[in-house]
Image: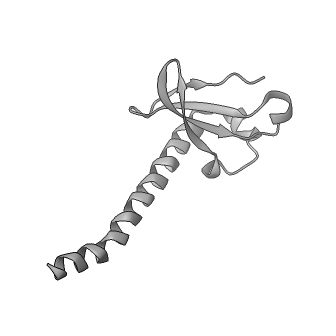
Amino acid sequence: MKKLVILFLALNPVVSNCSKETEADLQLQIREIAWNSLSEQEKLTVNVDWKQAPVSESSYNQKSVYAVRFNTTYDALLGPITVYVDISTKVVLGQALRD
């Protein structure tokens, strides 16, 4: 029984670390999907590394989605570009209106 407990304690950090990597990988995948949906003109205005864009859970047309926000050189005038990606299908559903 002691060996089982020791084995569990030894493997716990490894398993915990895997779930963190999976979450980071998922967010990077969502960012890439959103980035690839932007036009070349939109991409030119993004002023931060797209791999660092904030990803949050939101709703869009009564669906649960990921919202990816890209800051641009026109944020003061129009606001950032926000792309909505469906949580289950990982398909881009649309963008938020810019002011």
Identify whether 27 is placed above or below 69: below
Residue 33 shows in this picture: yes
Residue at the image point whose x is 69% and y is 21% from the top: 97
Provide residue 57's location: percent of width, then percent of height. Answer: 53, 36
Q: Residue at x 39, y 58 (%)?
A: 19
> Does residue 11 appear left or right of residue 44 in this picture?
left
Image location of residue 73, percent across then percent down: 82, 39
Residue 69 percent location from the top left of the image: 65, 38
Residue 74 in view here: no
Q: Is residue 7 above or below residue 76?
A: below
Direction left: furthest residue = 1
| Badge count | 0
Q: What residue is shown at x 65% (from left), y 32% (from top)?
A: 82
Find residue 5 and report its image quarter.
bottom left
**Outermost residue, top direction?**
61
Return the residue nearer the eye: 26 or 56: 56
Closer-to-camera residue (49/15): 15
Residue lying furthest right: 77
| Residue drawn where x is 51% and y is 39% of the image | 33
Residue 44 screen position, x and y as percent: 74, 40
Q: Is residue 1 left or right of residue 43?
A: left
Q: Quadrant of the C terminus?
A: top right
Question: Is 69 on the left-hand or right-hand side of 8?
Answer: right
Q: Check the picture and name the quadrant holding the N terminus.
A: bottom left
Q: How is the image coloured?
A: one colour
- From the viewer's side, name the closer residue of 2 and 85: 2
